[in-house]
């Protein structure tokens, strides 16, 4: 059967400069859709990418006159506010208003939808699946929250792809839709990679947060499949098989051996497949991706052939520089579970080397005194553990002041180094002895502009 043409020919994006929203604008433009947009602030790389495609708004700000009756729909990003003048105008005209996840669902109604959920591992599992599918030249669409190595855009929407792989974020859908994003995709195949309380500003208790995943699990339809981490205690509480019409698939870390600093997967045929990623969390991610690919008709030997060439997801244990006796990695880790998994993985991969690890507290949850105790003993693996935060970020997020000693107490590590000035942090790192020592930098921010490339160069040369 021929593909059904898209019903959306003219679309306007409110908050088009957002990370995922500008990628959606570019994907729709590539598809031939007439796209306009607005935002009150647009930063790089979104600004240059939109400009190159001819989609950059002429001026920053909100312009209700852009909202006209001939639009097929308006898509509103999370950055906008409920009283956004363009949103109010769209509602006044009775236009269809979609959140990002609502629109992705509308655009993929005729496709098989695979949604990867979980507090951690979502991007890595999604990256693994996309890598395998592309390696074997399968047709697929996708929507991912992070830039993936080897992919120009974070969103792809075509008319002929039979499946779409979606990273299922549990955060809110839009300023006027308080439902978690992954509830709106209506998955056929769902994954829950693990549950670790996050987004305290939206989900004030661990129980409320976990409930969102229970809802997701129970949304798995008849003849659908739910794939889950069978060893995660929180996941076990909500993935108890409740429907005989749903296929439940549990997974654990892939069987492997570690030899000379290299990880090898052990297959059912007792073959050893070298991979370029490492750590217990990545071995679980590989198992999850393998189960999804199996549901999509990828045979085991084909999965391993493809996975041997996978270099990792961008900003997920990403190698910055490597020398003879030192390596420098950066990682997106910021939540307690991600922090522990990442630091432990690097220490286990190089057990004979010292590990200096730095974490920037940057998100609302990580800077919240009520949430900080969740970090207890999650930073025990490094030989030298460092935490950095900028007091101005606390002011911006309207959070109370955070004494360094309170951070040290929350992490339950008496020798934890805490810095609130990026220059002092840089000086501390420059003074370290880097012989037989690795460096790990973890943040969803930038350590306030710290020159990581220069620091990595120094680490390798010492």
Image: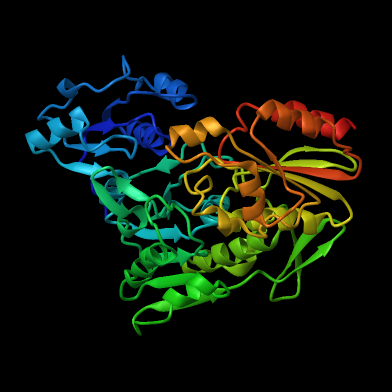
242 sits left or right of 318 in the view = left
346 is higher (above) or lower (below) than 419? below
Q: Residue at x 78, y 33 (%)?
A: 428
- Name the quarter where the N terminus is drawn: bottom left
Q: Where does the image place residue 433, in percent across and percent down from the top left?
A: 89, 37
Q: How is the image coloured?
A: rainbow
Q: Where does the image place residue 90, in percent across and percent down from the top left?
A: 14, 34
Q: Where does the image place residue 8, in percent across and percent down from the top left?
A: 21, 39
Q: How many marks?
A: 0
Residue 272 vs residue 419, the one in the foreground: 419
Q: Residue at x 41, y 82 (%)?
A: 241
On the question of residue 145 being in view, the answer is: yes
On the question of residue 160 being in view, the answer is: no
- Name the quarter where the C terminus is drawn: top right
Q: Where does the image place residue 120, in percent across and percent down from the top left?
A: 54, 57
The quadrant where residue 233 appears: bottom right
Q: Residue at x 37, y 59 (%)?
A: 113
385 sits left or right of 128 in the view = right
378 sits left or right of 125 in the view = right
425 is higher (above) or lower (below) than 317? above
Q: Residue furthest bottom?
A: 244
The quadrant where residue 444 appears: top right
364 is higher (above) or lower (below) than 378? above
């Amino acid at each position: 059967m021929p593909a059904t043409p898209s019903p959306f020919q003219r679309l306007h994006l409110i908050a088009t400069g957002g990370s995922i929203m500008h990628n959606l604008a570019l994907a729709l433009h590539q598809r031939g859709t007439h796209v306009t947009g607005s935002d009150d602030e647009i930063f790089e790389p979104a600004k240059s990418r939109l400009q190159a495609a001819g989609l950059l708004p002429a001026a920053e700000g909100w312009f209700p006159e852009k909202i006209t009756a001939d639009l097929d729909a308006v898509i509103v990003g999370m950055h906008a506010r409920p009283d956004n003048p363009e949103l109010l105008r769209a509602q006044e005209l009775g236009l269809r208003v979609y959140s990002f996840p609502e629109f992705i669902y509308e655009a993929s109604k005729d496709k098989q939808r695979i949604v990867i959920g979980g507090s951690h591992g979502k991007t890595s599992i999604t990256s693994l699946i996309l890598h395998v599918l592309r390696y074997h030249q399968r047709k697929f669409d996708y929507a991912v929250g992070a830039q993936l190595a080897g992919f120009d855009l974070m969103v792809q929407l075509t008319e002929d792809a039979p499946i779409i792989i979606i990273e299922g974020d549990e955060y809110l859908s839009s300023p006027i839709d308080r439902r978690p994003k992954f509830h709106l995709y209506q998955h056929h195949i769902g994954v829950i990679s693990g549950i670790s309380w996050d987004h305290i500003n939206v989900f004030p208790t661990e129980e409320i947060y976990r409930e969102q995943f229970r809802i997701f699990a129970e949304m798995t339809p008849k003849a659908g499949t739910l794939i889950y981490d069978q060893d995660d205690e929180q996941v076990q509480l909500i993935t108890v098989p409740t429907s005989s019409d749903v296929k439940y698939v549990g997974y654990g870390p892939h069987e492997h051996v570690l030899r000379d600093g290299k990880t090898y997967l052990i297959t059912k045929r007792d073959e050893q497949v070298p991979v370029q990623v490492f750590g217990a969390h990545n071995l679980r991610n590989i198992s999850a991706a393998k189960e999804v690919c199996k549901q999509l008709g990828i045979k085991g030997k084909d999965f391993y052939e493809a996975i041997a060439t996978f270099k990792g997801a961008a900003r997920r244990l990403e190698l910055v520089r490597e020398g003879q006796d030192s390596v420098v990695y950066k990682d997106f880790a910021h939540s307690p579970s991600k922090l522990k998994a990442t630091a432990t993985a690097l220490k286990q991969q190089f057990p004979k080397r010292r590990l200096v690890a730095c974490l920037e507290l940057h998100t609302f949850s990580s800077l919240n005194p009520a949430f900080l105790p969740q970090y207890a003993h999650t930073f025990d693996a490094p030989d030298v553990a460092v935490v950095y935060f900028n007091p101005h970020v606390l002011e911006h997020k309207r959070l109370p002041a955070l004494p360094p000693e309170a951070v040290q107490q929350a992490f339950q590590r008496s020798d934890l180094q805490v810095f609130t000035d990026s220059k002092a942090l840089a000086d501390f790192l420059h003074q370290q002895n880097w012989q037989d020592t690795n460096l790990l930098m973890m943040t969803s921010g930038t350590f306030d502009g710290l020159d990581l490339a220069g620091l990595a160069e120094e680490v390798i040369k010492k």
